[in-house]
């Protein structure tokens, strides 16, 4: 009888210990500061379909889409093409940036127009001024 009771009690303690104790990460001041920076960046970018973002997680996973909701501990990232959404914890994020940070098509068109105008001005105005009819021009 004593042996059965003791074995049931030990089994119960083992099960209780396995269920009730969960591993948690310690929050260091650096982690708290990093989470606050990510939260501030997400709040600065805002919510909307027009604001495309790239999110890099601590496990080097990259997610792309737009922010569809902002919560106190996480934000919702929705993939633009598929419509699939992910809840992303601020603590899991290593970097958030606006997608497509390169030069836009409009800027390339303006630069091409400026280069063309500079070439035309160079040949029509500056060449006759510099080359006073000499043999080298």
Image (cartoon, grey):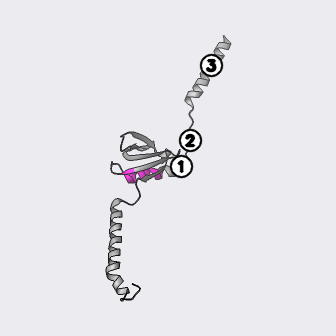
Q: Residue at x 49, y 44 (%)?
A: 61
Q: Between residues 45 and 131, which one lies in front from this camera angle?
A: 131
Q: Earlier in the sequence, mark 2 or mark 3?
A: 3
Q: Residue furthest front?
A: 135
The residue pinned by badge 2 equals: 25
Q: Position of residue 100 (x, y in %)?
A: 40, 55
Circle 3 packing at 10 Å, graded few (<14), some (14-19), many (20+), is: few
Q: CA distance from mark 2 to mark 1?
A: 10 Å
Q: Indicate whether 106 appears above or below 67.
A: below
Circle 1 packing at 10 Å, graded few (<14), some (14-19), many (20+), is: few
Check whether the beta carbons of the residues at disc 3 and disc 1 lie within 8 A of each other.
Answer: no
Q: Quadrant of residue 27?
A: top right
Q: Which mark is residue 3?
A: none
Per the image, is 42 magenta?
A: yes
Q: CA distance from mark 2 to mark 3?
A: 30 Å
SS for tag 1? Answer: helix
| Quadrant where the image shows the N terminus | top right
| Nearer the camera: disc 2 or disc 3 | 2
| Residue interval drawn in magenta | 36-52
SS for tag 2? Answer: loop
The residue pinned by badge 3 equals: 9
The residue pinned by badge 1 equals: 31
Check whether the beta carbons of the residues at disc 2 and disc 1 lie within 8 A of each other.
Answer: yes
């Amino acid at each position: 009888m004593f042996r059965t009771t003791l074995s049931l009690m030990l089994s119960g303690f083992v099960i209780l210990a396995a269920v009730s104790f969960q591993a948690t990460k310690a929050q260091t001041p650096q982690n708290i500061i990093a989470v606050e920076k990510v939260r501030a960046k997400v709040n600065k970018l805002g919510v909307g379909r027009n604001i495309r973002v790239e999110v890099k997680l601590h496990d080097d996973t990259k997610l792309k889409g737009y922010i569809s909701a902002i919560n106190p501990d996480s934000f919702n990232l929705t993939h633009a093409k598929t419509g699939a959404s992910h809840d992303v914890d601020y603590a899991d994020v290593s970097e958030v940036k606006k997608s497509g940070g390169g030069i836009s098509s409009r800027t390339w068109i303006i630069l091409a127009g400026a280069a063309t105008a500079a070439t035309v001005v160079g040949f029509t105005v500056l060449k006759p001024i510099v080359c006073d009819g000499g043999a080298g021009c």
